[in-house]
Amino acid sequence: MARPYRPGLPTRLAEMLAAILGGNILFLFLEPHLPRVLQHRLFRTDWGLAVDFALCAGLYGLIRLLRRRQA
């Protein structure tokens, strides 16, 4: 059985993509100024990865908040 089309889905996906790209770009410029323990090392689960996730999630929340105020 096919799923029904959800009209807001493409908008949500665009918001998520913008938050992920924006958060990662922000982390890229912020990382050299962070303490060593908060810097991310490749292929490891560490505090730097948590900081990156927090930036992306916070940016997504900000985007959703601003879009909700527009409507």
Image (spheres, grey):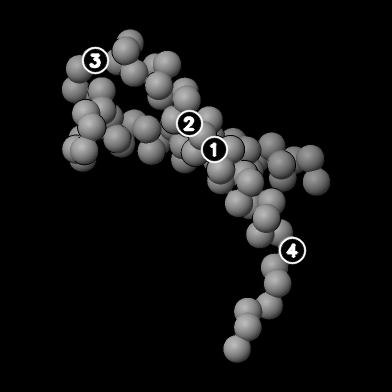
CA separation, marks 4 and 1?
20 Å
Residue 39 in percent (x, y) is at: 25, 23
Secondary structure found at label 4: loop
Q: Give the mark nearest the N terminus, 2 or 3.
A: 2
Determine the residue positioned at 42% across, 16% down: 29
Per the image, the residue denoted by label 3 is: 35
Determine the residue positioned at 33% across, 11% down: 33
Determine the residue positioned at 67% across, 55% down: 10
Q: Are marks 1 and 2 in contact (CB under 8 Å)?
A: yes
Mark sitting on residue 19: 1
Secondary structure found at label 3: loop
Per the image, the residue denoted by label 4 is: 7
CA separation, marks 4 and 3?
43 Å
Q: Amino acid at mark 3?
A: Pro
Mark sitting on residue 23: 2
Q: Give the mark nearest the N terminus, 4 or 3.
A: 4
Crowding at mark 3 (Cα within 10 Å: few <14, some 14-19, many 20+): few
